Image (cartoon, rainbow, N blue to C red):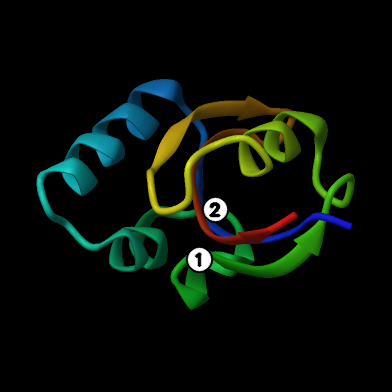
């Protein structure tokens, strides 16, 4: 069964999500931005979600985590919770 580890930053607006993505692309640390901006409790751990299997996250999130390249920040990803930046940190098929 496929497993993945990922981290994310959850915010309310697509604009904020795009701004944070630009900061990451300019070298700002993903984990530090997660601590400062993420609305998810995981933000305290730099956005780390730990390991999970396919189907354990909302479908939009799941699709990205199990298809995106490892180590490349994806987003904005819109879910019922808001807008996410997602980075797959590890994946096994």
Foreground of the two, 92 or 51:
92
Label 1 residue SS: helix
Q: Decide if residue 54 is on the left or right side of residue 18.
A: right
Q: Residue at x 68, y 42 (%)?
A: 66
Q: Decide if residue 87 is on the left or right side of residue 25.
A: right
Q: Which circle marks residue 43 in the picture?
A: 1
**On screen, 90 above or below 56?**
below
Label 2 residue SS: loop
Residue 31 position, x and y percent, is 36, 67
Q: Residue at x 81, y 38 (%)?
A: 58
**On screen, 69 above or below 71?**
above
Q: CA distance from mark 2 to mark 1?
A: 7 Å
Contact between labelled residues 1 and 2, with CB atoms less than 8 Å apart: yes
Foreground of the two, 81 or 60:
60
Residue 62 position, x and y percent, is 74, 39
Q: Residue at x 62, y 66 (%)?
A: 41
Q: Within the image, what quadrant is residue 32 found in?
A: bottom left
Foreground of the two, 91 or 80:
91
Residue 33 position, x and y percent, is 31, 59
Q: Decide if residue 24 is on the left or right side of residue 36.
A: left
Q: Which circle marks residue 39 in the picture?
A: 2
Q: Residue at x 38, y 33 (%)?
A: 17
In this rendering, which labeled residue sits more in front, label 2 or label 1? 1
């Amino acid at each position: 069964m496929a497993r993945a580890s990922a981290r994310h930053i959850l915010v309310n607006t697509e604009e904020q999500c795009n701004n944070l993505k630009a900061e990451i692309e300019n070298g700002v640390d993903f984990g530090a931005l997660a601590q400062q901006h993420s609305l998810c409790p995981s933000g305290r751990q730099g956005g780390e979600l730990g390991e999970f299997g396919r189907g354990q996250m909302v479908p939009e999130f799941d699709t990205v985590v199990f298809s995106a390249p490892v180590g490349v920040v994806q987003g904005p990803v819109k879910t019922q919770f808001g807008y996410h930046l997602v980075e797959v940190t590890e994946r096994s098929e």
